Image (spheres, rainbow, N blue to C red):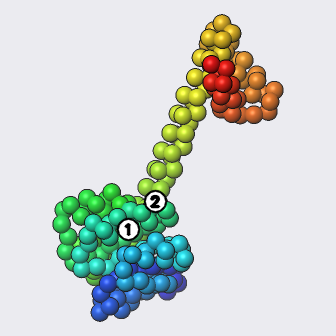
Amino acid sequence: MNVSFDVLLVSEEPSKTDTLQALLNDSGYRVTSHITTADDVIEEVNRSQPDIVVVKTEETNNYFMNQLYNLNQENPKPIVIFTDRSESGLIDGAIKAGISAYVVDGLSSERVKPVLEVARARFEQMQSLQKELKKTKSQLEERKTIERAKGLIMKSRNLSEDEAYKALRKLAMNKNQRLIEVATDVISVSEILI
């Protein structure tokens, strides 16, 4: 079988690590690094750049979820947690931390591959949605800035909205700049003059 995905394995249970590693290998995943504590997860992900992080733990806790949340803020990766026990509050924490799959008492050979595939697909979908959201927010902020600059031009030169927009656009073309750059400059200059 071709190994196609590198895994960082986080497991505090050495007795179960070999079994999980064999299940991962059989499913087309290769454990390229292994750590035993959540304290090192961010540093190890930055160092080894795995395709996916797989966690095997007896039970999760808030500190561990915070470490995974911080990881997702710094260097997002699909994260799968296999745990023996869990409380509903920790499942909510896992969702907030950006965990791609949280599996309670489900570490079996026939489940590992599908769980990891779904986790990777869910992670890619979430990354795509976050990228689209960020782009939309940026466009909205740019639009607000352009509208504000247009309002300043309307007020200072006694122009209509359409005339102010044309003046702003003409200035952008003359300066060979994007409209948002010129709008930001107009706002900056107006703040200096006021």
Q: Residue at x 44, y 66 (%)?
A: 71
Is residue 172 found left or right of 68 in the rendered image?
right
In terms of depth relative to the viewer, which is nearer, 109 or 183?
183
For residue 150, the mark is: none
- Name of the residue lying farthest toward the top: 158
Residue 74, position as x, y percentages in the image: 49, 62
For residue 67, the mark is: 1
Q: Quadrant of residue 63?
A: bottom left
Q: Quadrant of residue 85?
A: bottom left
Q: Quadrant of the C terminus?
A: top right
Residue 159, position as x, y percentages in the image: 66, 8
Label 2: few (<14), some or many (≥20) within 10 Å? few
SS type, badge 2: helix
Residue with the mark numbered 2? 73
As measured in the structure, the alpha-carbon distance from the residue carrying label 1 to the one carrying label 2 is 10 Å
SS type, badge 1: helix
Is residue 152 found left or right of 175 in the rendered image?
left
Residue 98, position as x, y percentages in the image: 37, 60
Q: Residue at x 69, y 9 (%)?
A: 157
Is residue 72 found left or right of 190 in the rendered image?
left
